[in-house]
């Protein structure tokens, strides 16, 4: 029984260290937003020359805006990101993501995007 308890504690420490080490920061969030916008704009604008130019410009702008507008709450093992699209503090205008283990997952989407 004692060995099992020690094993569980060691596994919990290893998992915690892994999550803390892979907790994504603001630069990773900016890159995530850029990739997401690039996919969306690329699908809507196409792959012709003008579409690629607009997509490239749009991804840079979106990444810069998201990095500045995002509010990160760091919980050491993961982070929560909130982007207030309405800039008025209303929860229904916020886009929320969790960053964990080097990845981002959407938690909620603003009403204006649904």
Image (cartoon, rainbow, N blue to C red):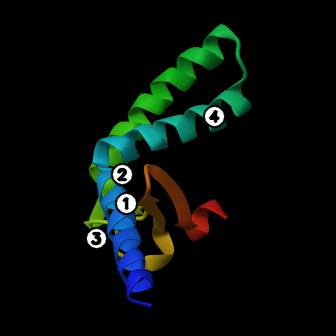
Mark 4 vs mark 1: give the one in front.
1
Lower position in the chain sequence, tag 4 or tag 1: 1
Left or right for 94, reference 109: left
Residue 79 visible here: no
Mark 3 vs mark 2: give the one in front.
2
Q: Is residue 45 depicted above or below 36 in this figure?
A: above
Q: Position of residue 55 (x, y in %)?
A: 56, 25
Are there few (<14), some (14-19), or many (20+) residues within 10 Å of tag 3? few
- Judging by the rendered image, the residue that carries numbered circle 1 is 19
The reply to whether the C-beta atoms of the residues labelled 3 and 1 are less than 8 Å apart is no
| Residue closer to the observer: 114 or 102 | 102
- Judging by the rendered image, the residue that carries numbered circle 2 is 22
Residue closest to the far bottom: 1
Residue 66 visible here: yes
Mark 4 vs mark 2: give the one in front.
2
In the structure shown, which secondary structural element does the residue marked by tag 4 occupy?
A: helix
Lower position in the chain sequence, tag 3 or tag 1: 1
Marker disc for residue 75: 3
Q: Disc 3 to disc 2, how far (Cα)? A: 12 Å
The reply to whether the C-beta atoms of the residues labelled 2 and 1 are less than 8 Å apart is yes
Marker disc for residue 39: 4
In the structure shown, which secondary structural element does the residue marked by tag 3 occupy?
A: loop
Lower position in the chain sequence, tag 4 or tag 2: 2
Lower position in the chain sequence, tag 3 or tag 2: 2
Left or right for 19, reference 50: left
Q: Quadrant of residue 9?
A: bottom left
For image coordinates 72% across by 31% down, the residue present is: 43
Q: Position of residue 12 (x, y in %)?
A: 38, 73
């Amino acid at each position: 029984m004692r060995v099992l308890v020690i094993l569980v504690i060691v596994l919990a420490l290893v998992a915690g260290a892994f999550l803390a080490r892979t907790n994504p920061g603001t630069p990773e969030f900016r890159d995530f937003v850029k990739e997401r916008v690039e996919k969306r704009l690329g699908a809507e604008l196409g792959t012709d020359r003008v579409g690629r130019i607009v997509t490239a410009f749009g991804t840079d702008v979106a990444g810069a805006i998201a990095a500045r507008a995002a509010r990160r709450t760091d919980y050491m093992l993961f982070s929560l990101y909130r982007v207030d699209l309405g800039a008025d503090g209303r929860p229904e205008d916020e886009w929320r993501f969790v960053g964990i283990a080097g990845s981002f997952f959407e938690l909620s989407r603003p009403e204006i995007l649904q």
